[in-house]
Amino acid sequence: MLAFRLDRMAPVWVALGHLLITILIGIAMLPTASAQDRRQNTPGEFDFYVLSLSWSPSFCEEATERGNNGRSQQAQCGERPFSFVVHGLWPQYEHGFPEYCERPSPRLERNIMTSMLDLMPAPGLIFNEWDKHGTCSGLGARGYFETIRKARAAVKIPPEFIDLSDPKTVSPAQVEEAFIKVNPGLPADAIAVTCNRTRLSEVRICMSKDLQFRSCEEIDRRACRRDQVTMPPVRGG
């Protein structure tokens, strides 16, 4: 009798197994945080920009520690005294962000790349930023990089960080306050400092499509939570 009941229950267990598999597949296919916007990856349809300014000495020390001495690293990490350099200008949604909005991306002309080396001193970085972020701006390559130049010109670097000759220990809040002080109208929730385990990595500033400072809660929440970080000195200074 028990064997008979087990036989009758077998189809039920099989059905439940199929249902569980279906649920797990559905969960796996749910959109990630960067893919939740209905406009996902439609060129030109986004809410604001993030101007990311990388502290070049931190990048170069980390590249040295990893043994990464590629051509891009050599271009940025030689003896030229780079302090904050442009990592990128990233289209953003209020939640998440688009990326690689045209595949294959339109070819970036070499003369446009070379024109940006004063702000973004690594050819590989420039090509990558165009493919990953520039194609989402809705602008042509020349227009996108002109917008990067305008965004960078709209942000003043605190003077204490321009020719830093010795290592400096700071709190993320101090860095934010320094930027807010020299950039009138920059609200505290429009800037975020990022870091790795010990070093300051980037300062990220949120800007509207017309390059005015604007709040961005999601970016602000991702800021560095360490009490103190190190800013390695500027090379070749």
Image (cartoon, rainbow, N blue to C red):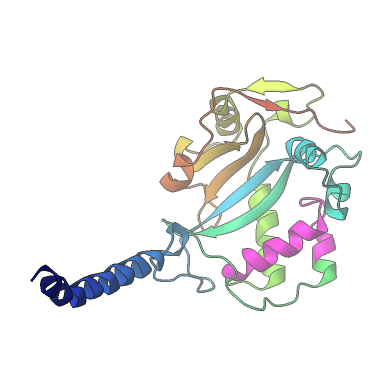
Q: Measuring from the top left, give residue 119's x and y in whole percent.
A: 77, 50
Horizontal side, residue 27 vs residue 107: left or right: left
Is residue 100 or residue 32 the one in the foreground? 32
Q: Position of residue 126 (x, y in %)?
A: 75, 60
**72 over 14 or under it: above or below:** above
Q: Quadrant of the C terminus?
A: top right
Task: Indicate left or right for 230 with 8 as reference.
Answer: right
Residue sitting at 49 percent across and 41 percent down?
A: 222
| 42 and 32: which is toward the camera | 32
The vertical placement of 147 against 219, above or below, is below
Q: Main secondary structure of the magenta part?
A: helix
Magenta range: 113-137
- Magenta span has 219? no
Q: Is residue 83 visible?
A: no
Residue 156, quarter of picture: top right
Residue drawn at 53 percent across, 71 percent down: 44
Seen from the viewer's position, the closer of residues 222 and 20 is 20
Q: Position of residue 168 (x, y in %)?
A: 71, 22
Residue 42 vs 94, above or below: the answer is below
Residue 86 can be seen in this image: yes
